Image: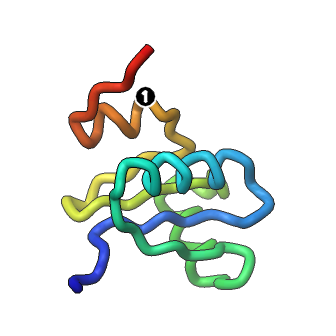
Amino acid sequence: MTDPKITVYGADWCKDCRRAKKFLDEQGIPYQWVDTDADKAAEDFVRGLNNGMRIIPTILFEDGSFLSEPSDAELAQKFNLQLEP
């Protein structure tokens, strides 16, 4: 099995992080989880992407793009998925 091409930076206490992980899990999209509470370098990386702010979840994609605190609709659009109303 190959390594996931998506990295989700977040924290267990974050409801938006749990929601994003649930969305990816339900869609069968593999990802690597990085806990920014446990990894100072990861927190610094997130702050670097988000103009010094710790916005989580921050999701980094294979193409180098990222989404910060995305909605389910934004994630669906990124993966060209159709969400049912």
Which is nearer the eye, 11 or 51?
11
- Residue at point 39% right, 20% down? 84
- How crowded is the residue under tag 1: few (<14 C-alpha within 10 Å), some, or many (20+)? few
- Residue at point 55% right, 51% down? 22
Residue 52 percent across, percent down from the top left: 61, 57
Specify whether 79 is left or right of 43.
left
Q: Which SS class for mark 1?
A: helix
Colouring used for the render: rainbow
Q: Quadrant of residue 62?
A: bottom left
Q: Quadrant of residue 83?
A: top left
Residue 78 percent across, percent down from the top left: 28, 39
- Residue at point 61% right, 46% down? 19
Which is nearer the eye, 28 or 60?
28
Residue 10 percent across, percent down from the top left: 62, 63
Which is nearer the eye, 51 or 75?
75
Q: Amino acid at mark 1?
A: Ala
As drawn, the residue found furthest toward the right would be 13
Specify whether 24 is left or right of 57.
left
- Residue at point 58% right, 54% down? 57
- Count of number-bearing discs: 1
Residue 80 percent across, percent down from the top left: 21, 35
Question: Which quarter of the image is occupied by the N terminus?
Answer: bottom left
Question: Which quarter of the image is occupied by the C terminus?
Answer: top left
Specify whether 84 is left or right of 39.
left
As drawn, the residue found furthest toward the top would be 85
Q: Read off the residue under disc 1.
A: 73
